[in-house]
Amino acid sequence: MTLERTQKALAIIVGAFVFYTAATGPFEGLIQRAIFLALVCALGFTLYPLAAGKPWRRSGLAVDLLLCAATLAACSYVVWNYDRIMTTLPWATTLDKALTLALVISVLELGRRTVGMIFPALVVAGIGYALFGNMMPGALRHRGFDASFVTETIFLGDLGIWGMLTGVAATVIASFVLFGALLLHTGGGQAFMDLAMRLGGRQPGGAAKIATISSGLFGMISGSAVANVATTGNFTIPMMIRLGYPRPFAAAVEAVASTGGQIAPPIMGAAAFVMAEILGLPYVTIIAAAILPAVMFYISVFMTVHFVALRRGLAIVPEEDLPAWAAIIAPRRALPVLAALGGLGIGIWLGRSIATSAFYGVVGLLATFIATQVGQLSPRDMLGRIIAGLEDAGKGMVIIGVLLAGAQVLVSMINLTGIGVTLSSLIVTMAGDSVVLVSIIVGLVCLVMGMGLPTTAAYVLVAAVLAPAMTAVGADPLAAHLFVFYFATISVITPPVCVAVFVGSGIAGTNWLPAAGEAVRLGAVTYLVPFLLIFYPGMTMNGGVAGIAEAIAAGFALVLAVPALLAGARLTRCRVLDIGLFLLIIALAIWPHPVTPFIALATFLGARSLGGAARKVSA
């Protein structure tokens, strides 16, 4: 069997396992997680072979086979010994230590192949700290743990590699990855793109607005901002360049819009499900709390693009390049998407589990796709699209499954050693119990810790270490977790390790540094909105009607004033006065007081109206 056929076979097996357990319910905790990890690792070694295309590929194949066999052995051992592990406190034997070492090496090696060295290095540092922390100085010192105890924590229980994060990956996240991949490959992707083109194409800066809308729609069901840039950017960036948009600007628009999709419900880069488990809150509560910040983000990007387009005279998209509304709303285009989203919504409304709701969505999608494509596509073509969706889902499950299994190891070491509590205490001590100072310090640290990491892995890391510092000074736990999540997420557009910008710049054929500057400007509001989460409970739908109204006023004042300031929009004839007014509005919006948000919004709208009237009189 060739490598390609092996990949397809394994992808189908992974997809079938996820589909089956979503429909019938998962197996017992450790069994579900062990089978899932075994399958995604086996698929991972075929998708990311060692030394592919190099002269020493034969040696790489031997390493892949050895690691794959070791992974299967370790996972089979856990399935076979499930009762003993869960009902006793087993002592780690030499075999346990060997299997643990082999499994951790396999997971980290796949992590290295998929996302680079940063994440595996963090996990190794966490294990090293658990083993040798007794040698550390000062507050970082702990009593130290031997190899047997670390093995028992990682492998022989549900606190280590078989813990909650791996469980979420093996059930809820895997179901949504399958749902999203099949939706995109059965026509949803083209439907999103066509809708974005029709909505944004004929406005000033139309191509950039198309990129904003389409990347946002794709990003809402994608688990990776970088993958989203690579997918939609191959269409939107060349279109912007063809219409005369500056290359750095084109790369930045795509990078920022794709990143925004990661903070937008319902998936939030898969972090929504993890956050719900960590906080013990319903999934619906998480996505409800994330709606306002996501709306603020996209209005801000849209407004920035609009102001820049007006100032630079960026072209609209020619009418002949846009799809007709009749084609967009045609039943064979629209019905599969509506059936998928409808099935998902019905499942949630009926109170089913999130994984089962995703199963309903998949069933509705596939049934409608087949029904609407009869006579349009041959059975072979329909099956080919479904298989392509399964392959993409398998690839996505590999990345998420491996990263969350590795993250679970790191979290277990953080909890074992207490380093998270220690660092939180140090931050609170430095900031003197000030919510503002703690928030600023935590935000900066999140930007650094999230660099180079995918959305979910970045969130897990900062949630374990930094969110406790926020709650220690009185922040609401949900607001604190959203705060660290947003800052960790936007690290992908923040220099110097702005990986989403790197990918967009590569597609645009431009230097990444000016593109990063444009990205920071386009996404500027995202650096401020997290503070509204801390200062205004209404941003997370708490605080009643009055609290939500305050949050909306503060948010709209920001998303209007910040883009206008950065794009050089005019309120008066004096540029200095304009800058002063914009800064005043921003300060009033952020200032935590029940009245100031309304004053900020009224100031902007009033100054805008007066400025417009003055320009008409002078004309």
Image (cartoon, rainbow, N blue to C red):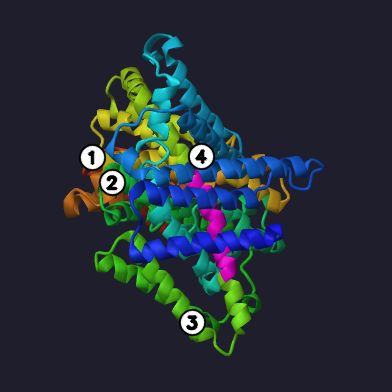
Determine which quarter of the picture holds residue 102.
top right
Q: Earlier in the sequence, mark 3 or mark 4?
A: 3
Q: What is the three-letter code of the residue carrying label 1? A: His
Q: Which residues are magenta?
A: 387-403
* Left-right relation of 533 to 374: left
> Of circles 3 and 1, which is in front?
3
Distance between mark 3 and mark 1 Cα atoms: 46 Å
Q: Earlier in the sequence, mark 2 or mark 4?
A: 4
Query: Helix, strand, or loop for circle 2?
Result: helix
Residue contact between numbered discs 2 and 1, judged by CB atoms under 8 Å: yes
> Residue beneath label 2, please?
597
Query: Helix, strand, or loop for circle 1?
Result: loop
Q: How many marks?
A: 4
Q: Position of residue 412 (x, y in %)?
A: 38, 32
Between 289 and 322, the one nearer to me in the picture: 289
Crowdedness of circle 4 by 10 Å Cα count: few (<14), some, many (20+)?
Answer: many
Numbered badge on residue 491: 4
Q: Earlier in the sequence, mark 3 or mark 1?
A: 3
> Of circles 1 and 4, which is in front?
4
* Left-right relation of 159 to 219: left
Main secondary structure type of the part rendered in magenta? helix
Residue contact between numbered discs 2 and 4, judged by CB atoms under 8 Å: no
**Residue visible at 68% across and 60% down?**
4
Q: What is the three-letter code of the residue carrying label 2? A: Pro
Distance between mark 1 and mark 4 Cα atoms: 29 Å
Numbered badge on residue 593: 1
